[in-house]
Amino acid sequence: MDEIAERIGGLKKKLNAVIVAHNYQRPEVQDIADFCGDSLELARKCTETDAEVIVFCGVHFMAESAAILNPRKMVLLSEADAGCPMADMISGDKLREWKARYPGATVVCYINSSAEVKAESDYCCTSANAVKLVESIDAEDILFVPDKNLGHYVSTKVNKNIIVYPGCCPPHDRVTPEQVKLARQNYPQAQFVVHPECVPGVVAMADAVLSTSQMIRYVKESEADTFVIGTEQELLYRLRKDNPEKSFYVLSPSLICPNMKKTTIDSVVKTMELKRNVITVPEEVRLRAKRALDRMLAVV
């Protein structure tokens, strides 16, 4: 690992690059990253770095967001095939159809969407700021895309009419209330912390409903010493590293994102060596998508 770290360090210096990784990446990938975080943290970090090259260890829509916000920087996606099933559930054409159905609605798209979808939206949001952002909008009708579960969660927190598109994150959507009941039997003293991409029945049974960055802060500040975590299993690596005196258990064995696992140390090295998987967004699309992202960043 020391040899790999030295090799990556040399490539970073040669390219003037920064490596950012999502909290769901493999532990060894998180370890070689300059910064780990959730979608909002990474979006912000990419705008703050002086590096000329951003090596994004995540999935396609995340690297696209970095490219939208940093047109003068080269953005490399660590693994070309790392996509997002939720993002693929909606396209620009589908969103235009829904906008025609609800012509008076303000469109809020979850950041887990393509540049094309962001370009068709009024605002972008993340799981960490969705409620705050929707509350800030001076509109009664909100068309929320593409995650039905996050959209439903927002609808329980704001006094607005939320029209929800029927997309989802498959791993989060598979978690059931029965699994929560079983975990509570197995870990009766544990705090149950789940992601708002989970189904409403699971969310209703949680002690806290949080984004991954919020989970990291929550467990660190909590007096509890045992937690059941309802999100992608790799977050537990970060939680255990930051809180070695506490115990963490994943809520369901189905909480694995295959696309996040496509990135390996080897793929990061090859991507940097070859300067491959360059993410580009057509300028007309980029400018419209950037407007939605800028509006989000201005609110939060």
Image (spheres, helix red, strand yellow):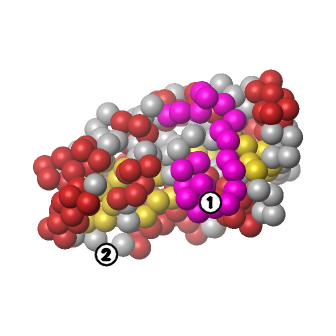
Q: Residues within 10 Å of mark 2 (few under 14, many from 20)?
A: few
Residue 190 colored magenta?
Answer: no
Q: Position of residue 133 (x, y in %)?
A: 68, 58
Relative height, residue 50 to residue 239 (above, below): below
Amino acid type, mark 2 = Asp
Tell me whether circle 1 and circle 2 mark residues in contact (CB < 8 Å): no
Q: What count of labels does the image hold?
A: 2
Q: Is residue 39 left or right of residue 288?
A: right
Front position in the image: 71 or 234: 234
Q: Position of residue 234 (x, y in %)?
A: 53, 44
Amino acid type, mark 1 = Pro
Give the magenta part as a residue range.
Answer: 236-257
Q: Residue at x 19, y 54 (%)?
A: 272
Q: Position of residue 54 (x, y in %)?
A: 30, 60
Q: Residue at x 47, y 60 (%)?
A: 36
Residue 247 colored magenta?
Answer: yes
Within the image, what quadrant is residue 156 found in?
Answer: top right
Q: Earlier in the sequence, mark 1 or mark 2?
A: 2
Q: Which mark is residue 244?
A: 1
Q: Which mark is residue 50?
A: 2
Gap between marks 1 and 2 measured at Cα: 33 Å
Per the image, label 2 sits on a secondary structure element best described as loop
Quadrant in which the C terminus appears: bottom right
Q: Residue at x 73, y 31 (%)?
A: 199
Relative height, residue 162 to residue 243 (above, below): above
